[in-house]
């Protein structure tokens, strides 16, 4: 494992539940030796990506430069953002776009109407693909064996009583999504949350990302969501298609 | 220079104007040897942070994990975001929060009403501190010598005909900002753009960040912006104060 790989693993082990970590905790989370974890943390501190208060290490906002390097260099988030804003304004619901990374989706753009989820979502947020509408759209675009492999890697677990975790049932759902061209997820990620997603397709017919609308079940039921939003989302899909590389 | 430091410098050299780079270009931008640049790029590619098409390297969205590690682990963006959204909704203008990093500000939260700048702003975006309202609020909170040093490090350059670049004039402006507790910047960053910022202050009276409202000069002139927005912003400053660590 190269020093660079170790250092990036150290950065990634900080999150909302682990905002300050000791050397021992970083070693445990990354499976590095304590000496290696210590070396990475001291290098990160010296070059301004972390700070140390004598006991705990924390990341500094300088780390944002790294994520921003991709956001700034990729055309997709910039291109999609105004479309999401329009969609979100017209529907009064939150709209997001994401990519698949392993068994997770990663948000690349978002337009929020009101805070409806218990967890704040922002660009860079990761959620499991198997139980999200965008994740299902993106998994459905993969060869079935690959989709199955990724679902299993993520070790699906129940998030609500409605979460489908059985991989065979999930594969059946993906086949349906592939056929109909969109996915609806009804409170499988969080109680009260309904979401509909369609793929972003490039002129070579490749699925490069997905975008969604999500709302509260009290306002929009899973039965109504397609009738209410799908035509508008498909129109946007068509508008975006020639613009995507 | 440690391998980790080199690798992070390589990631940072990608941006909107440099979305795909050759080994030679990365070596030039980072001042690394070609061999070192090549080694970093190959490691980044092997572990999934970059991809190579035979000629050019690009970052992958996996890089977002790094920036997101800070966003998720820092309480400030999560705490400020709903306040910015309310402010933005009430005023119909865009609102942002940022921190100072060297001679630049870095956006940590943002609520956008409409796209008013030619450049899209998002969390992680960096702008020069000397010609932005949030930057002036943050520079004004530093000891004057330190503020002067940072301004000079950034090599201020004119962005519009109105940009103040003379460091002595800037120091006079900072003294005024310190006295009045807010900064207004009138089309010094971009023509047509007016912005007002106040500091976010913790219970120990330390300035930890700044937040702003920005609008188009046709709708809100620099003369009117304080009367229109400042009371609301100061009320928010007071509400946030006891919540900030």
Image (cartoon, coloured by chain):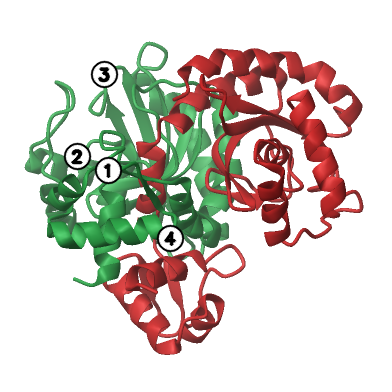
Chain colours: A red, B green
Q: Are marks 4 and 2 on the same chain?
A: yes
Q: Secondary structure at mark 2?
A: helix
Q: Earlier in the sequence, mark 2 or mark 3?
A: 2
Q: Nearer the viewer, residue B166 or A74?
A: A74
Q: Which residue is mark 1?
A: B136
Label 4 marks which chain's residue? B
Q: Earlier in the sequence, mark 1 or mark 3?
A: 1
Q: Nearer the viewer, residue A172 or B127?
A: A172
**Is residue B131 shown to the viewer in this render?**
yes
Location of the N terminus of chain B by quadrant is bottom left
Instruction: Classify 10 Å Cα crowding around label 3: few (below 14), some (14-19), many (20 and above).
Output: some
- Mark 1 in CB contact with mark 3 (< 8 angstroms): no
Label 1 marks which chain's residue? B
Foreground tag (1 vs 3): 3
Q: Earlier in the sequence, mark 4 or mark 2?
A: 4
Distance from Cα at disc 4 to Cα at disc 1: 40 Å
Q: Which residue is mark 3?
A: B191
Distance from Cα at disc 4 to Cα at disc 2: 48 Å
Report the disc number at residue B173: 2
**Is residue A61 shown to the viewer in this render?**
no
Label 2 marks which chain's residue? B
Q: Secondary structure at mark 1?
A: helix
**Residue located 78% across and 38% down the image:** A174
**Residue located 25% across and 62% down the image:** B39
Q: Are marks 1 and 2 on the same chain?
A: yes
Instruction: Classify 10 Å Cα crowding around label 4: few (below 14), some (14-19), many (20 and above).
Output: some
- Mark 1 in CB contact with mark 2 (< 8 angstroms): yes
Distance from Cα at disc 4 to Cα at disc 3: 43 Å
Q: Position of residue B188 (x, y in %)?
A: 22, 27
Q: Which residue is mark 4?
A: B47
- Mark 4 in CB contact with mark 2 (< 8 angstroms): no
């Amino acid at each position: 494992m190269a020093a660079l790989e170790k250092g990036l693993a150290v950065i990634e082990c900080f999150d909302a539940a682990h905002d300050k970590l000791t050397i021992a905790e970083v070693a445990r989370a990354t499976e590095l030796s304590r000496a290696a974890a210590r070396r990475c943390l001291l290098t990160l501190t010296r070059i301004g990506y972390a700070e140390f208060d004598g006991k705990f290490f924390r990341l500094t906002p300088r780390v944002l430069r790294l994520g921003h390097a991709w956001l700034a260099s990729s055309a997709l988030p910039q291109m999609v953002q105004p479309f999401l804003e329009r969609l979100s304004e017209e529907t009064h619901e939150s709209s997001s776009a994401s990519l698949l990374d392993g068994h997770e989706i990663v948000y690349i753009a978002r337009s929020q109407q009101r805070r409806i989820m218990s967890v704040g979502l922002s660009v860079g947020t990761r959620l499991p693909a198997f139980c999200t509408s965008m994740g299902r759209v993106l998994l459905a675009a993969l060869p079935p064996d690959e989709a199955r492999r990724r679902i299993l890697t993520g070790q699906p677990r129940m998030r609500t009583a409605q979460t489908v975790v059985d991989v065979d049932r999930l594969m059946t759902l993906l086949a349906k999504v592939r056929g109909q061209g969109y996915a609806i997820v009804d409170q499988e990620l969080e109680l009260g949350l309904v979401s509909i997603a369609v793929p972003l397709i490039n002129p070579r017919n490749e699925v490069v990302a997905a975008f969604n609308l999500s709302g509260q079940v009290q306002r929009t039921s899973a039965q109504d969501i397609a009738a209410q939003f799908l035509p508008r989302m498909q129109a946007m899909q068509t508008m975006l298609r020639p613009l995507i590389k």
